[in-house]
Amino acid sequence: MSNIFRITQNDYSCLIEALLSMKNVEQGAALFAGHVQREGKNIFMIREVLPIPQNDMVYQHSTGRRLKASAFMKLAEKAYNQGLSLIMAHSHPGTLNTFSTTDDNNESEMMPRLLMLTDNSIPHGTLVMDSKGRMDARFWSPGKASPTPIDWINIIGRPMKNIPTTSNHSRKSNVDIFLYDRQVKMFGHDGQKLLAETPVTIIGAGGTGSVIGNQLAYLGVTNFTIMDEDLVEHSNLNRLLGASPKDISKYKADVLADTICRINPEAKVKVFKENLRADNVPFELTESQVLFLCTDSMISRAILNDISLRYLIPIIDIGVGINAKDGEVFSAGGKIYLAIPGIACLQCLKRISADALLQEQMLLDKRYKGYVHGYEIKRPSVISLNSLIASQAVTTFIDLITGCLGHQISYVKCYDMLEGDLLTMDIIKESSCRYCDSLKGMGSEGSTSMKTSSCR
Ligand SMILES: [Zn+2]
Ligand SMILES: [Zn+2]
Protein backbone atom coordinates (compact mmCIF):
# COMPACT_ATOMS: atom_id res chain seq x y z
CA MET A 1 0.00 0.00 0.00
CA SER A 2 1.46 3.35 -0.91
CA ASN A 3 0.44 6.98 -1.15
CA ILE A 4 1.48 9.10 -4.07
CA PHE A 5 1.86 12.69 -5.28
CA ARG A 6 1.65 12.74 -9.09
CA ILE A 7 2.99 15.79 -10.94
CA THR A 8 3.72 16.59 -14.59
CA GLN A 9 7.33 17.19 -15.62
CA ASN A 10 6.59 20.86 -16.32
CA ASP A 11 4.94 21.45 -12.95
CA TYR A 12 7.82 19.64 -11.24
CA SER A 13 10.26 22.07 -12.90
CA CYS A 14 8.02 24.94 -11.72
CA LEU A 15 8.11 23.53 -8.18
CA ILE A 16 11.91 23.31 -8.15
CA GLU A 17 12.12 26.88 -9.45
CA ALA A 18 9.62 28.12 -6.84
CA LEU A 19 11.45 26.42 -3.95
CA LEU A 20 15.13 26.49 -4.87
CA SER A 21 15.64 29.72 -6.83
CA MET A 22 16.98 31.63 -3.80
CA LYS A 23 19.89 30.23 -1.83
CA ASN A 24 19.83 30.52 1.99
CA VAL A 25 16.14 31.47 2.18
CA GLU A 26 13.20 29.18 2.85
CA GLN A 27 10.73 29.52 -0.01
CA GLY A 28 7.15 28.36 -0.32
CA ALA A 29 4.69 27.18 -2.96
CA ALA A 30 1.02 26.21 -2.91
CA LEU A 31 0.05 23.15 -4.92
CA PHE A 32 -3.56 22.41 -5.85
CA ALA A 33 -4.38 18.77 -6.48
CA GLY A 34 -7.21 16.41 -7.29
CA HIS A 35 -7.41 13.44 -4.91
CA VAL A 36 -8.51 9.86 -5.24
CA GLN A 37 -8.62 7.19 -2.57
CA ARG A 38 -8.88 3.55 -3.51
CA GLU A 39 -8.38 0.48 -1.33
CA GLY A 40 -6.63 2.58 1.30
CA LYS A 41 -4.24 4.10 -1.24
CA ASN A 42 -4.26 7.86 -1.77
CA ILE A 43 -3.18 9.54 -4.99
CA PHE A 44 -2.93 13.34 -5.29
CA MET A 45 -2.77 14.64 -8.87
CA ILE A 46 -1.13 18.06 -8.86
CA ARG A 47 -2.98 20.48 -11.08
CA GLU A 48 -1.32 23.78 -10.37
CA VAL A 49 1.86 25.09 -8.72
CA LEU A 50 1.69 28.63 -7.33
CA PRO A 51 4.94 30.11 -6.02
CA ILE A 52 4.28 32.12 -2.84
CA PRO A 53 5.51 35.70 -3.41
CA GLN A 54 7.59 37.52 -0.78
CA ASN A 55 4.68 39.96 -0.29
CA ASP A 56 2.58 37.13 1.12
CA MET A 57 5.16 36.30 3.81
CA VAL A 58 5.41 37.88 7.27
CA TYR A 59 9.11 36.90 7.25
CA GLN A 60 11.34 34.59 5.26
CA HIS A 61 14.90 33.58 6.24
CA SER A 62 17.26 30.60 6.22
CA THR A 63 15.55 28.65 9.00
CA GLY A 64 11.94 29.67 8.72
CA ARG A 65 9.16 31.54 6.99
CA ARG A 66 5.68 32.59 7.95
CA LEU A 67 2.75 33.03 5.60
CA LYS A 68 0.41 35.96 6.18
CA ALA A 69 -2.98 34.86 7.55
CA SER A 70 -4.77 36.67 4.71
CA ALA A 71 -2.71 34.79 2.07
CA PHE A 72 -3.41 31.47 3.80
CA MET A 73 -7.16 32.22 3.84
CA LYS A 74 -7.10 32.98 0.10
CA LEU A 75 -5.37 29.68 -0.70
CA ALA A 76 -7.82 27.74 1.50
CA GLU A 77 -10.75 29.47 -0.20
CA LYS A 78 -9.43 28.63 -3.67
CA ALA A 79 -8.96 24.95 -2.70
CA TYR A 80 -12.48 24.80 -1.25
CA ASN A 81 -14.12 26.50 -4.25
CA GLN A 82 -12.40 24.18 -6.71
CA GLY A 83 -12.84 21.00 -4.63
CA LEU A 84 -9.06 20.45 -4.65
CA SER A 85 -6.54 19.51 -2.00
CA LEU A 86 -4.05 22.18 -0.97
CA ILE A 87 -0.45 21.02 -0.58
CA MET A 88 1.75 23.56 1.19
CA ALA A 89 5.36 23.12 0.03
CA HIS A 90 8.51 24.72 1.40
CA SER A 91 12.27 24.42 1.04
CA HIS A 92 15.04 23.72 3.53
CA PRO A 93 18.08 25.61 2.26
CA GLY A 94 20.43 23.09 3.90
CA THR A 95 20.38 19.30 3.79
CA LEU A 96 17.48 18.54 6.15
CA ASN A 97 15.49 16.35 3.77
CA THR A 98 12.52 15.73 6.05
CA PHE A 99 10.13 17.69 8.26
CA SER A 100 11.70 19.55 11.20
CA THR A 101 10.26 19.69 14.71
CA THR A 102 9.17 23.26 13.93
CA ASP A 103 7.35 21.93 10.84
CA ASP A 104 5.63 19.29 13.02
CA ASN A 105 4.49 21.95 15.49
CA ASN A 106 3.35 24.42 12.82
CA GLU A 107 1.45 21.77 10.89
CA SER A 108 -0.38 20.39 13.88
CA GLU A 109 -1.85 23.89 14.25
CA MET A 110 -2.28 24.84 10.57
CA MET A 111 -3.61 21.64 9.00
CA PRO A 112 -6.62 21.02 11.31
CA ARG A 113 -7.53 24.67 10.63
CA LEU A 114 -7.22 24.15 6.89
CA LEU A 115 -9.37 21.01 7.08
CA MET A 116 -12.00 22.95 9.00
CA LEU A 117 -11.92 25.88 6.53
CA THR A 118 -12.60 23.42 3.70
CA ASP A 119 -15.53 21.83 5.51
CA ASN A 120 -13.59 18.66 6.45
CA SER A 121 -14.38 17.39 2.98
CA ILE A 122 -10.95 16.90 1.42
CA PRO A 123 -7.47 15.91 2.66
CA HIS A 124 -4.60 18.38 2.40
CA GLY A 125 -0.86 17.87 2.32
CA THR A 126 2.60 19.29 2.90
CA LEU A 127 5.90 18.82 1.12
CA VAL A 128 9.47 19.76 1.96
CA MET A 129 12.44 19.89 -0.42
CA ASP A 130 16.08 20.28 0.62
CA SER A 131 18.75 22.12 -1.39
CA LYS A 132 19.61 18.91 -3.28
CA GLY A 133 15.99 18.44 -4.38
CA ARG A 134 15.29 15.52 -2.02
CA MET A 135 11.69 15.49 -0.86
CA ASP A 136 9.49 14.37 1.96
CA ALA A 137 5.71 14.70 1.95
CA ARG A 138 2.60 13.78 3.92
CA PHE A 139 -1.11 14.48 4.09
CA TRP A 140 -3.76 15.17 6.69
CA SER A 141 -7.20 13.58 6.35
CA PRO A 142 -10.43 14.85 7.92
CA GLY A 143 -11.01 13.18 11.29
CA LYS A 144 -7.41 11.95 11.69
CA ALA A 145 -5.22 13.47 14.41
CA SER A 146 -1.88 12.77 12.74
CA PRO A 147 -0.54 12.94 9.19
CA THR A 148 -0.01 9.99 6.82
CA PRO A 149 3.30 9.77 4.90
CA ILE A 150 3.49 10.04 1.13
CA ASP A 151 5.71 7.25 -0.26
CA TRP A 152 6.33 8.25 -3.85
CA ILE A 153 6.44 11.32 -6.05
CA ASN A 154 5.52 10.25 -9.61
CA ILE A 155 6.88 12.58 -12.28
CA ILE A 156 4.80 12.31 -15.45
CA GLY A 157 7.02 12.99 -18.45
CA ARG A 158 9.77 11.44 -20.51
CA PRO A 159 11.04 9.37 -18.85
CA MET A 160 8.47 8.69 -16.18
CA LYS A 161 10.09 8.86 -12.74
CA ASN A 162 9.10 7.41 -9.38
CA ILE A 163 11.01 9.23 -6.68
CA PRO A 164 10.78 7.74 -3.17
CA THR A 165 10.22 10.29 -0.39
CA THR A 166 12.72 10.43 2.48
CA SER A 167 10.31 8.60 4.76
CA ASN A 168 9.79 5.74 2.27
CA HIS A 169 11.93 2.90 3.55
CA SER A 170 10.42 0.20 1.36
CA ARG A 171 12.94 -1.86 -0.53
CA LYS A 172 12.54 -2.04 -4.26
CA SER A 173 11.85 -5.45 -5.74
CA ASN A 174 14.68 -7.56 -7.08
CA VAL A 175 14.57 -8.77 -10.64
CA ASP A 176 15.77 -12.13 -11.94
CA ILE A 177 18.93 -10.96 -13.69
CA PHE A 178 19.55 -14.37 -15.27
CA LEU A 179 16.09 -14.51 -16.82
CA TYR A 180 16.31 -10.98 -18.16
CA ASP A 181 20.07 -10.97 -18.83
CA ARG A 182 19.77 -10.39 -22.58
CA GLN A 183 17.52 -7.34 -22.25
CA VAL A 184 19.26 -5.98 -19.13
CA LYS A 185 22.17 -5.56 -21.55
CA MET A 186 19.85 -3.14 -23.39
CA PHE A 187 17.90 -1.29 -20.64
CA GLY A 188 20.32 -1.72 -17.75
CA HIS A 189 19.44 -3.23 -14.39
CA ASP A 190 17.59 -0.08 -13.28
CA GLY A 191 15.57 -0.03 -16.51
CA GLN A 192 14.52 -3.63 -15.94
CA LYS A 193 13.41 -2.78 -12.39
CA LEU A 194 11.42 0.19 -13.65
CA LEU A 195 9.59 -2.03 -16.14
CA ALA A 196 8.83 -4.54 -13.38
CA GLU A 197 7.46 -1.82 -11.11
CA THR A 198 5.28 0.05 -13.61
CA PRO A 199 1.59 -0.85 -13.27
CA VAL A 200 -0.14 -0.92 -16.66
CA THR A 201 -3.70 -1.28 -17.89
CA ILE A 202 -4.58 -2.87 -21.22
CA ILE A 203 -7.99 -1.78 -22.46
CA GLY A 204 -9.15 -4.29 -25.04
CA ALA A 205 -7.77 -7.85 -24.92
CA GLY A 206 -8.29 -8.56 -28.62
CA GLY A 207 -6.03 -8.59 -31.67
CA THR A 208 -3.58 -5.91 -30.55
CA GLY A 209 -4.22 -6.05 -26.77
CA SER A 210 -3.38 -9.77 -26.54
CA VAL A 211 -0.06 -9.24 -28.34
CA ILE A 212 0.80 -6.30 -26.11
CA GLY A 213 -0.11 -8.31 -22.97
CA ASN A 214 2.12 -11.21 -24.08
CA GLN A 215 5.04 -8.94 -24.93
CA LEU A 216 4.79 -7.01 -21.65
CA ALA A 217 4.74 -10.27 -19.69
CA TYR A 218 7.88 -11.51 -21.48
CA LEU A 219 9.44 -8.09 -20.87
CA GLY A 220 9.04 -8.53 -17.11
CA VAL A 221 6.14 -6.19 -16.37
CA THR A 222 4.47 -7.59 -13.25
CA ASN A 223 1.45 -5.44 -12.48
CA PHE A 224 -1.46 -5.62 -14.94
CA THR A 225 -5.09 -4.60 -15.17
CA ILE A 226 -6.92 -6.10 -18.15
CA MET A 227 -10.21 -4.60 -19.22
CA ASP A 228 -12.52 -6.20 -21.78
CA GLU A 229 -16.21 -7.10 -21.61
CA ASP A 230 -16.23 -9.44 -24.64
CA LEU A 231 -16.15 -13.21 -24.87
CA VAL A 232 -13.85 -15.17 -27.15
CA GLU A 233 -15.60 -16.23 -30.34
CA HIS A 234 -14.58 -18.91 -32.82
CA SER A 235 -13.71 -16.21 -35.38
CA ASN A 236 -11.29 -14.47 -32.94
CA LEU A 237 -8.90 -17.43 -32.86
CA ASN A 238 -6.98 -16.23 -35.93
CA ARG A 239 -5.44 -13.40 -33.91
CA LEU A 240 -5.84 -13.76 -30.12
CA LEU A 241 -2.29 -14.53 -29.09
CA GLY A 242 -2.25 -17.34 -26.52
CA ALA A 243 -5.89 -18.36 -27.08
CA SER A 244 -6.97 -21.81 -28.29
CA PRO A 245 -10.32 -23.46 -29.18
CA LYS A 246 -10.91 -24.43 -25.53
CA ASP A 247 -11.10 -20.70 -24.69
CA ILE A 248 -14.23 -20.09 -26.80
CA SER A 249 -16.97 -18.42 -24.69
CA LYS A 250 -14.50 -17.42 -21.96
CA TYR A 251 -13.88 -13.74 -21.29
CA LYS A 252 -11.07 -12.36 -23.44
CA ALA A 253 -9.73 -10.60 -20.35
CA ASP A 254 -9.52 -13.90 -18.42
CA VAL A 255 -7.80 -15.65 -21.32
CA LEU A 256 -5.16 -12.91 -21.56
CA ALA A 257 -4.72 -12.87 -17.77
CA ASP A 258 -4.10 -16.66 -17.81
CA THR A 259 -1.56 -16.32 -20.62
CA ILE A 260 0.29 -13.54 -18.77
CA CYS A 261 0.43 -15.62 -15.58
CA ARG A 262 1.72 -18.63 -17.51
CA ILE A 263 4.53 -16.52 -18.99
CA ASN A 264 5.32 -14.77 -15.73
CA PRO A 265 3.97 -16.51 -12.59
CA GLU A 266 5.15 -13.50 -10.53
CA ALA A 267 2.70 -11.19 -12.33
CA LYS A 268 -0.31 -9.74 -10.52
CA VAL A 269 -3.22 -9.41 -12.93
CA LYS A 270 -6.52 -7.74 -12.18
CA VAL A 271 -9.34 -8.42 -14.59
CA PHE A 272 -12.20 -6.02 -15.20
CA LYS A 273 -15.04 -7.32 -17.38
CA GLU A 274 -17.12 -4.23 -17.75
CA ASN A 275 -17.60 -1.64 -20.42
CA LEU A 276 -15.30 1.36 -20.46
CA ARG A 277 -18.40 3.51 -19.88
CA ALA A 278 -19.08 1.91 -16.46
CA ASP A 279 -19.06 4.39 -13.54
CA ASN A 280 -16.26 2.66 -11.61
CA VAL A 281 -13.81 2.60 -14.54
CA PRO A 282 -11.82 5.72 -13.57
CA PHE A 283 -11.14 4.30 -10.10
CA GLU A 284 -10.05 0.94 -11.51
CA LEU A 285 -7.46 2.71 -13.63
CA THR A 286 -6.03 5.25 -11.18
CA GLU A 287 -3.18 3.06 -9.93
CA SER A 288 -1.89 2.43 -13.44
CA GLN A 289 1.00 4.46 -14.73
CA VAL A 290 0.46 3.70 -18.41
CA LEU A 291 -2.80 2.94 -20.25
CA PHE A 292 -2.67 0.89 -23.47
CA LEU A 293 -5.79 1.68 -25.47
CA CYS A 294 -6.36 -1.21 -27.88
CA THR A 295 -10.06 -0.84 -28.70
CA ASP A 296 -9.72 1.38 -31.77
CA SER A 297 -12.92 3.36 -31.16
CA MET A 298 -13.53 7.11 -30.84
CA ILE A 299 -15.76 6.72 -27.79
CA SER A 300 -13.01 4.80 -25.96
CA ARG A 301 -10.49 7.46 -26.94
CA ALA A 302 -12.70 10.26 -25.63
CA ILE A 303 -13.34 8.45 -22.31
CA LEU A 304 -9.69 7.45 -21.83
CA ASN A 305 -8.45 10.93 -22.72
CA ASP A 306 -10.63 12.35 -19.95
CA ILE A 307 -9.29 9.79 -17.44
CA SER A 308 -5.68 10.29 -18.57
CA LEU A 309 -5.85 14.05 -17.98
CA ARG A 310 -7.84 13.93 -14.74
CA TYR A 311 -5.54 11.33 -13.12
CA LEU A 312 -2.27 12.20 -14.92
CA ILE A 313 -1.72 8.83 -16.63
CA PRO A 314 -0.09 8.61 -20.09
CA ILE A 315 -1.94 6.76 -22.87
CA ILE A 316 -0.46 4.69 -25.67
CA ASP A 317 -3.27 4.47 -28.22
CA ILE A 318 -3.13 1.81 -30.92
CA GLY A 319 -5.24 1.65 -34.06
CA VAL A 320 -5.05 -0.81 -36.95
CA GLY A 321 -7.09 -0.77 -40.16
CA ILE A 322 -7.33 -2.80 -43.35
CA ASN A 323 -9.49 -1.83 -46.30
CA ALA A 324 -9.87 -4.90 -48.50
CA LYS A 325 -12.38 -6.83 -50.55
CA ASP A 326 -12.26 -10.30 -52.08
CA GLY A 327 -8.53 -10.79 -51.73
CA GLU A 328 -7.54 -7.28 -52.82
CA VAL A 329 -6.08 -4.87 -50.25
CA PHE A 330 -6.68 -1.18 -51.01
CA SER A 331 -5.01 0.20 -47.91
CA ALA A 332 -3.70 -1.20 -44.65
CA GLY A 333 -1.71 0.08 -41.75
CA GLY A 334 -1.75 1.29 -38.18
CA LYS A 335 -1.08 4.21 -35.90
CA ILE A 336 0.41 4.61 -32.44
CA TYR A 337 -0.19 7.76 -30.41
CA LEU A 338 1.60 8.63 -27.18
CA ALA A 339 -0.33 11.18 -25.09
CA ILE A 340 1.41 12.39 -21.91
CA PRO A 341 -0.50 14.75 -19.57
CA GLY A 342 1.34 18.05 -19.41
CA ILE A 343 2.67 17.57 -22.96
CA ALA A 344 -0.27 16.63 -25.18
CA CYS A 345 -3.56 14.74 -25.02
CA LEU A 346 -5.38 12.70 -27.67
CA GLN A 347 -7.51 15.77 -28.46
CA CYS A 348 -4.61 18.10 -29.21
CA LEU A 349 -2.77 15.31 -31.05
CA LYS A 350 -5.88 15.39 -33.29
CA ARG A 351 -6.56 11.71 -32.62
CA ILE A 352 -10.21 12.29 -31.76
CA SER A 353 -12.52 13.25 -34.59
CA ALA A 354 -15.73 14.96 -33.50
CA ASP A 355 -17.62 13.62 -36.54
CA ALA A 356 -16.49 10.02 -36.02
CA LEU A 357 -17.29 10.31 -32.32
CA LEU A 358 -20.82 11.51 -33.10
CA GLN A 359 -21.36 8.71 -35.61
CA GLU A 360 -20.21 6.07 -33.13
CA GLN A 361 -22.46 7.53 -30.45
CA MET A 362 -25.50 7.53 -32.77
CA LEU A 363 -24.82 3.92 -33.76
CA LEU A 364 -24.49 2.98 -30.11
CA ASP A 365 -27.79 4.73 -29.24
CA LYS A 366 -29.56 2.87 -32.04
CA ARG A 367 -28.11 -0.40 -30.79
CA TYR A 368 -29.40 0.29 -27.27
CA LYS A 369 -32.84 1.04 -28.67
CA GLY A 370 -32.72 -2.23 -30.63
CA TYR A 371 -32.68 -0.70 -34.14
CA VAL A 372 -29.26 -2.13 -34.96
CA HIS A 373 -28.02 -5.55 -33.96
CA GLY A 374 -24.29 -6.11 -33.60
CA TYR A 375 -22.60 -2.74 -33.18
CA GLU A 376 -19.21 -4.14 -34.10
CA ILE A 377 -18.52 -4.21 -37.80
CA LYS A 378 -16.37 -7.25 -38.63
CA ARG A 379 -13.47 -5.51 -40.31
CA PRO A 380 -10.51 -7.34 -41.83
CA SER A 381 -7.83 -8.16 -39.27
CA VAL A 382 -4.59 -10.12 -39.54
CA ILE A 383 -2.11 -11.10 -36.81
CA SER A 384 1.01 -9.94 -38.70
CA LEU A 385 -0.18 -6.33 -38.92
CA ASN A 386 -1.59 -6.34 -35.37
CA SER A 387 1.72 -7.68 -34.04
CA LEU A 388 3.80 -5.12 -35.91
CA ILE A 389 1.78 -2.21 -34.52
CA ALA A 390 1.64 -3.79 -31.03
CA SER A 391 5.45 -4.16 -31.11
CA GLN A 392 5.81 -0.48 -31.94
CA ALA A 393 3.54 0.39 -29.02
CA VAL A 394 5.61 -1.75 -26.63
CA THR A 395 8.82 -0.14 -27.92
CA THR A 396 7.26 3.27 -27.19
CA PHE A 397 6.50 2.00 -23.67
CA ILE A 398 10.10 0.77 -23.15
CA ASP A 399 11.44 4.19 -24.08
CA LEU A 400 8.84 6.02 -21.98
CA ILE A 401 9.79 4.04 -18.86
CA THR A 402 13.53 3.41 -19.25
CA GLY A 403 14.61 6.24 -21.57
CA CYS A 404 17.04 3.76 -23.16
CA LEU A 405 16.26 5.00 -26.68
CA GLY A 406 17.00 8.58 -25.68
CA HIS A 407 13.33 9.59 -25.98
CA GLN A 408 13.69 9.59 -29.73
CA ILE A 409 10.38 7.75 -30.03
CA SER A 410 7.90 10.07 -31.69
CA TYR A 411 4.50 10.91 -30.21
CA VAL A 412 2.79 9.76 -33.40
CA LYS A 413 3.83 6.84 -35.59
CA CYS A 414 2.06 5.64 -38.73
CA TYR A 415 2.72 2.43 -40.60
CA ASP A 416 1.66 1.86 -44.20
CA MET A 417 1.53 -1.89 -44.87
CA LEU A 418 1.48 -1.55 -48.67
CA GLU A 419 4.46 0.78 -48.82
CA GLY A 420 6.21 -0.82 -45.87
CA ASP A 421 6.93 2.64 -44.46
CA LEU A 422 6.92 3.58 -40.81
CA LEU A 423 6.55 7.34 -40.54
CA THR A 424 6.93 9.41 -37.42
CA MET A 425 5.26 12.76 -36.98
CA ASP A 426 6.03 15.68 -34.73
CA ILE A 427 3.35 16.97 -32.42
CA ILE A 428 1.27 19.52 -34.23
CA LYS A 429 -0.29 21.09 -31.20
CA GLU A 430 -2.10 24.35 -30.75
CA SER A 431 -0.58 26.53 -28.03
CA SER A 432 -3.39 25.76 -25.62
CA CYS A 433 -5.83 22.88 -25.52
CA ARG A 434 -9.08 23.31 -23.61
CA TYR A 435 -9.08 19.63 -22.60
CA CYS A 436 -5.48 19.66 -21.30
CA ASP A 437 -6.07 22.97 -19.51
CA SER A 438 -9.44 22.27 -17.93
CA LEU A 439 -9.08 18.60 -16.92
CA LYS A 440 -5.45 18.31 -15.81
CA GLY A 441 -5.20 16.70 -12.36
CA MET A 442 -8.87 17.31 -11.52
CA GLY A 443 -9.64 13.77 -10.38
CA SER A 444 -13.37 13.15 -10.34
CA GLU A 445 -14.12 16.34 -8.43
CA GLY A 446 -14.15 20.05 -9.04
CA SER A 447 -15.22 22.54 -11.62
CA THR A 448 -13.74 22.11 -15.08
CA SER A 449 -14.21 25.70 -16.15
CA MET A 450 -11.06 27.17 -14.66
CA LYS A 451 -7.72 27.67 -16.31
CA THR A 452 -4.35 26.51 -15.07
CA SER A 453 -1.72 29.16 -14.58
CA SER A 454 1.87 28.89 -15.65
CA CYS A 455 4.94 29.46 -13.49
CA ARG A 456 6.51 31.50 -16.23
ZN1 LIG B 1 10.61 23.03 7.35
ZN1 LIG C 1 -4.84 18.47 -25.13
Image (spheres, rainbow, N blue to C red):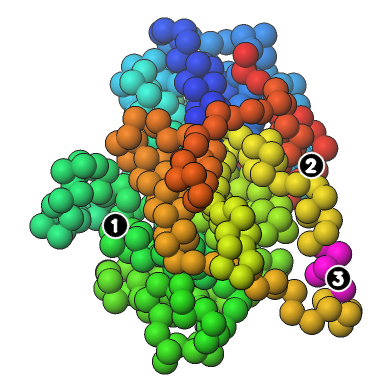
Residue appearing at x 32%, y 68% in the figure = 267
Label 1 beta carbon less than 8 Å to ligand 2: no
- Image quarter for residue 452? top right
Residue appearing at x 87%, y 73% in the figure = 366
The residue wearing badge 3 is 365
Q: Which of 194 and 37 is in front in this view?
A: 194
Ligand 1 quarter of the rendering: top left
Which amino acid type is shown beneath numbered disc 2? Thr
Q: Which of 10 and 212 is in front in this view?
A: 212
The residue wearing badge 2 is 448
Residue 132: image location, x then y, percent: 33, 21
Residue 317 visible here = yes
Magenta span: 361-366
Prevailing secondary structure of the magenta residues: helix
Quadrant location of the N terminus in the rendered image: bottom left
Which amino acid type is shown beneath numbered disc 1? Leu
Which amino acid type is shown beneath numbered disc 3? Asp
The residue wearing badge 1 is 219
Residue 364 is covered by the magenta coloring: yes
Specify few, some or many for label 2: CA neighbours under 10 Å numbering under 14, 14-19, or 20 or more. some
- Image quarter for residue 342? top right
For marks 2 and 1, the one nearer the N-term is 1
Residue appearing at x 41%, y 8% in the figure = 24
